[in-house]
Image (cartoon, grey):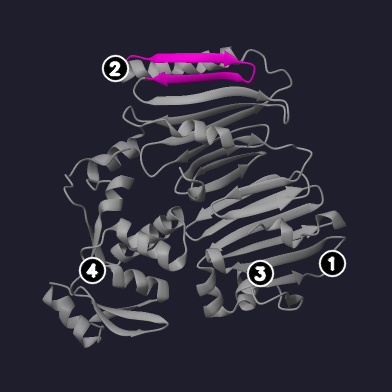
Amino acid sequence: MSLEKQAAFRWQGFEVLLPEDWAPVSLIGDRREGYCRFGSPGSMGFQVRWKATRRPGRLKDSLFAYFRILQKEARRAGKAFESELEESDDGIAYRWRAHAKAQGQLFYSPVCGRVFFLELLGDRKDSLALYRRIASTFRPMDPKGPDRWSVLGLDVRFPSLVQLEKRTFQAGRTVLEFSAKGFRAQASRWGFGEQLAAQHGLARWAVAALSLSEQGTHQDGPDSLYWDGPSRLGWRSRALVRLDRDKNRILALKASYRKPQWRPEWDWLES
Amino acid sequence: MGLARILSSTLDRRRRLEPEELRKAVPMANPAVKVVSEGESGLILEAPLQTSTNRWIAGLARILKQPETKRFELEPVGAFVWKSIDGNTSFEGISRRLREQYKMSRVEADAALGAFLQMLAQRRLITLWIRGARPSRRRR
C-alpha cells in the first residue's frame, strides 16, 4: 500500500488511511457508539467498532465475547477456531483463524474516552500484512479540536463538534448533512466537475444544484464562488462552491447559522 | 428468509453478479443499435423498437404510424463509455479509461460505470458477457 494510493477516512471523531480503492460498506451509529466497515475490491475488509465509556473495564471480556460468536460461526462452517492474543499497556492485539481470518486490536483512547475495536478481515488465503500499515494510521481525534469528516473524496472540517444527520452516497455524488446548536450544513462532492462547469457554467450549476437564489451569488476567482442568503429570524445562510480541476470534482458547503463562528470559511472545504 | 424472498429466489433464476465477475465482464453493444449523430455534446443512438408478432396489432401500429425506432441521447461522458464498448474491453478496462480521462477514483468510476451500464442494459442497448459463467441460483 503506497502512500499515494491511500485515502483518508475521517468519521465520528477518528481518522484512518485506507487504500484508495476500498469503499465504505457499512456505516452505523453516532459518536457515542458505532460501527463502520470498508471493503476492498477483493475479499478483504477493515472494520472499526467504537463505544464511549468512562471506565474501559476489562477489554479482554469484550474480546472473549466476540470470540465466542466467532466460534459458533466457525462450528457452523465446520472449521476449527484458533486465536492468539497479546496484552500490552496500549490494549490487546489479537489474531483469529477459522472460516475466515483476521488481525486486530482493542484499546481505550483517553483522548476521546472511547474503546475502539480495529480489525482487518480476509479469506483464509488472504495476507493480512496490510494490517500494521492501516492500524498505524488510525488516530482518534480530540473532541475539543476541530471536527473533520472525509469520505469518498469529500473532505470538510468544522470549528467544533457537529452531529451527522444524513448521508447520501450516489455514483458521482457524496452528500453529508450536519447539525450543531444554531448550525445546519450540507457538504457535497460532485464528480465530473470540469464537465459540469463546462456544460452549465459553475454559477448556474451551483444555483440549480444547491437551490440558491441568483441574487447573492458572487464569483470569488475563476473556479470558486460564494453565496450569502438573506437573514431570517436570526439565521444567516452562506454557501461556498469550489471547482477542483486537479481532481475533477466540485466541492460545496451550504450552511445556515446563528452565530458568526459558524460562518463557513474556505478552509472548511479541504482540497 | 421470508416467504417472499423464497418465492422470489425460486422464480427468478437470474444470478446476482459478484464484484469480481462484474470487473471481468465484457459489455457488448446490441448490433441493431446505430450511432446516428456524433458531436462535442455527445452522441445519439438509434435502436429498432420491438414489433408485435400479432398481425392485427402490427397492422394497427402501422395505421397509427407508430415509430419503428427509438433514439437515445448520450452526453459526452456517456458517449465516451459507449465508444469504449467494443466487445473486447472489459468492465475493468472501461473503468480504467474513465479514471484516466476524468480523474476519478476507482470506487467512483466503478459506481458510475455500473449504474450507466445497468441503464443501457435495461434499455437493451447492451448485454454483459461473462466469461466462464455458469448459471446458478440467485444468492441471498
Residue on which the image places disc 2: A78
Residue on which the image places disc 4: B86
Quadrant the N terminus of chain A occupies: top left
> Mark 4 belongs to which amino acid?
Asp
**At 35% from the left edge and 80% from the top edge, which residue is drawn?**
B43
- In front: A190, or A135? A135
Q: Are marks 2 and 1 on the same chain?
A: yes
Number of the front mark, 4 or 3: 4
Quadrant the C terminus of chain A occupies: bottom right
* Spatial CA span between label 2 and label 1: 65 Å
Number of the front mark, 4 or 1: 4
- Which SS class for mark 3? loop
* Spatial CA span between label 4 and label 1: 55 Å
**At 21% from the left edge and 69% from the top edge, which residue is drawn?**
B30
Q: How many marks?
A: 4
- Marked residue chain, label 2: A
- In front: B83, or A130? A130
Magenta residues (range): A79-97
Mark 3 surroundings: few (<14), some (14-19) or many (≥20) residues within 10 A: few
> Mark 1 belongs to which amino acid?
Ser
* A32 in magenta: no
For the residues bearing labels 3 and 1, Cβ distance under 8 angstroms: no
* Spatial CA span between label 2 and label 4: 46 Å
> Mark 2 belongs to which amino acid?
Gly
Q: Would you say A129 lies left or right of B67 here?
A: right
The x, y position of residue B8, in whole percent, is 29, 43
- Which SS class for mark 4? loop
Q: Are marks 2 and 3 on the same chain?
A: yes
> Mark 3 belongs to which amino acid?
Ser
Residue on which the image places disc 3: A211
